[in-house]
Image (cartoon, helix red, strand yellow):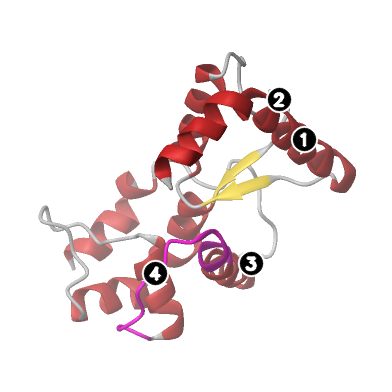
């Protein structure tokens, strides 16, 4: 199967990619929306690298507004005392002692389902990220593109993680 996929991509990749990119651009324009992803920088870099491998300059136009749901969730959810306590109680800590903040851990916190395992499919990721964003909106109804600075360096965050 993988060989077939690679073969199709080699034969039709540029055409398919161009059509997909244009469809996404038109949807963004039609609905005047932002693009949002958990750890958007990673996705953005992957899309850009893939676009460049096919001879395109980039995937999104420079004017496309991209929100990083990971940063939003850090600012609105992960800096709460409840999240810090939840992570410490369930040992959701990195080797360096930092709180884990993946979409999976964030969703576990929101649902209080410590057995939840992320499926890592487009639909499943969209469903949990929608739930995370809704929870963020409940905490802060008005979102701005400058929603977070250096969250982990903020004194309140540092104190909560140590305390």
Camera-near label (3 vs 2) is 2
Question: Is residue 161 visible from the viewing direction of this image?
Answer: yes
Q: CA distance from mark 2 to mark 4?
A: 31 Å
Quick check: marks 3 and 2 in contact, CB under 8 Å?
A: no
Q: Nearer the viewer, residue 124 or 8?
A: 8
**Residue at 31 percent of width and 51 percent of height:** 155
Count neighbours of disc 3 (C-alpha within 10 A) and say few if under 14, some if 14 to 19, many if 20 or more: some
Residue at the disc numbered 2: 61
Q: Quadrant of residue 118?
A: bottom left
Residue at the disc numbered 4: 118
Query: What is the number of the mark on residue 25?
Result: 1
Provide the major secondary structure of the magenta segment.
loop
Q: CA distance from mark 2 to mark 1?
A: 8 Å
Q: CA distance from mark 1 to mark 4?
A: 28 Å
Query: What is the number of the mark on residue 70?
Result: none
Camera-near label (4 vs 3) is 4
Q: Is residue 41 left or right of residue 156?
A: right
Residue 103: x, y in percent? 41, 62
Residues in magenta? 113-126
Secondary structure of the residue carrying tag 1 is helix
Count neighbours of disc 2 (C-alpha within 10 A) and say few if under 14, some if 14 to 19, many if 20 or more: few
Q: Is residue 10 above or below residue 1?
A: above
Q: Hey, which residue is sitting farthest right in the picture?
A: 30
Quadrant of the image containing the C terminus: bottom left
Residue at the disc numbered 3: 137
Q: Nearer the viewer, residue 8 or 96?
A: 8
Q: CA distance from mark 3 to mark 2?
A: 27 Å
Secondary structure of the residue carrying tag 3 is helix
Quick check: marks 2 and 1 in contact, CB under 8 Å?
A: yes
């Amino acid at each position: 199967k993988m060989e077939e996929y690679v073969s199709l991509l080699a034969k039709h990749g540029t055409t398919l990619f161009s059509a997909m990119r244009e469809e996404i651009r038109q949807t963004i324009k039609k609905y005047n929306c932002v693009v949002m992803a958990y750890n958007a920088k990673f996705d953005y870099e992957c899309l850009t690298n893939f676009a460049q491998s096919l001879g395109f300059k980039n995937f999104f136009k420079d004017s496309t507004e991209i929100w990083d749901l990971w940063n939003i969730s850090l600012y609105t959810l992960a800096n709460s005392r409840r999240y810090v306590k939840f992570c410490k109680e369930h040992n959701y800590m990195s080797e360096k002692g930092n709180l884990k903040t993946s979409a999976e851990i964030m969703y576990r916190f929101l649902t209080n389902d410590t057995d939840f395992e992320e499926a890592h499919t487009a639909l499943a990721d969209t469903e949990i990220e929608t739930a995370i964003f809704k929870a963020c909106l409940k905490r802060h109804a008005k979102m701005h593109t400058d929603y977070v600075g250096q969250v982990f360096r903020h004194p309140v965050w540092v104190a909560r993680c140590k305390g």
